[in-house]
Image (cartoon, helix red, strand yellow):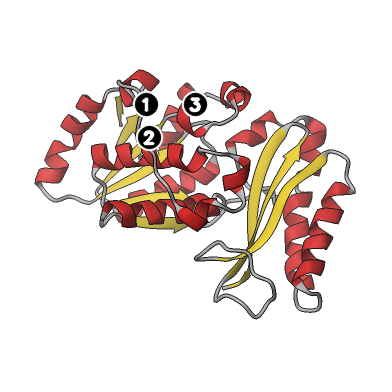
Amino acid sequence: MQLITTTSALQEALANAHASHRQIGLVPTMGALHPGHRSLIERARRENDVVVVSVFVNPIQFNNQEDLAKYPRTAEADCQLLQHAGADIAFLPSVEEMYPTPVTDVYHFGALEEVMEGPQRPGHFSGVAVVVRRLFDLVQPTRAYFGEKDFQQLAIIRNLIAQIGSDIDIVACPIVRDDDGLALSSRNMRLSSEARRVAPLIYATLREAVLLSSSLSMEQVKHFVLSKLTATTLFEPEYFEIVDDSTLQPIANWGEGQGVVGCIAVWLDGVRLIDMVRFRP
């Protein structure tokens, strides 16, 4: 595996792959890698000739500077995981390397960014789009891999592809969970022992909501989810929305939409966690 820290070296390393029309898989990450990331890398390994994994904590997608400062950084352990998972290139640039000049790019995503994460994290999705676009331009991948836990981000990236007229294949990968159901996340390592003990209640509640959806109205299901979590004092739900899986717009009853998903953000002992569940394919 090649460890690369500069954009020029990255492009040089990929020149032969592009010249010989080899298929390149890109897995963008912010590091603090876990088995969920590994599943993305392993899939990219199966489907491509060359696998590039970026590890970069992108400052412009954080609207909370304290959250940025606390975001876990584990470069040495990350490189070990990348080696074992089969990455060909690990790209670990500095902020100055990714953004040698002040960032002036701004992306807009209309209704997709006006729900759920959007109002809570102004500017977040534009910041995500900026770094992903730069990675796309540098790597020019055949495919790029993203996890479904960040369901709204996945829709944003697909919209970005349409905006820039790219033919990169965006591959959505299933959520990987711990044995107790908690969705794997880099932020989980910040949970206290007590918070980690109760954290699986998020997914357990979502699963129960799916079962109840056959007998309760949508509003009743939403009330159930929020009430059950707030009954445990460590939880502070930020939102729980039931939306169309393509437009991400809230729906009023179970008869609307082709695919229906529930998306949630919860503060747990000072750590913000997100998850999602599918109500209808």
Q: Residues within 10 Å of mark 1 (few under 14, many from 20)?
A: many
**Residue that carries the numbered disc 2 in the rendered image:** 54
Where in the figure is residue 12, as x and y percent of width and height? 16, 30
Question: x, y percentage for residue 223?
Answer: 82, 61
Q: Which residue is mark 1?
A: 92
- Assess whether mark 1 and mark 2 are in contact (beta carbons under 8 angstroms): yes
Is residue 58 visible in the rendered image? The answer is no
* Residue at x-position 82% and y-position 68%: 220
| Residue 204 sits above or below residue 269 on the image | below
Q: Specify whether 242 is left or right of 195.
A: left
User: In the image, what residue type sits under mark 2?
Assistant: Ser
Q: Earlier in the sequence, mark 2 or mark 3?
A: 2
Q: CA distance from mark 2 to mark 1?
A: 6 Å
**What is the CA distance from the residue labelled 2 to the residue labelled 3?**
14 Å
Q: Is residue 35 left or right of residue 267?
A: left
Q: Are marks 2 and 3 in contact (CB under 8 Å)?
A: no
Q: Residue at x 21, y 25 (%)?
A: 9
Q: Secondary structure at mark 3?
A: helix
Q: Which residue is mark 3?
A: 77
Query: Which part of the image, by quadrant, shows the N terminus?
Result: top left
Q: Position of residue 280 (x, y in %)?
A: 61, 73
Q: Amino acid at mark 1?
A: Leu
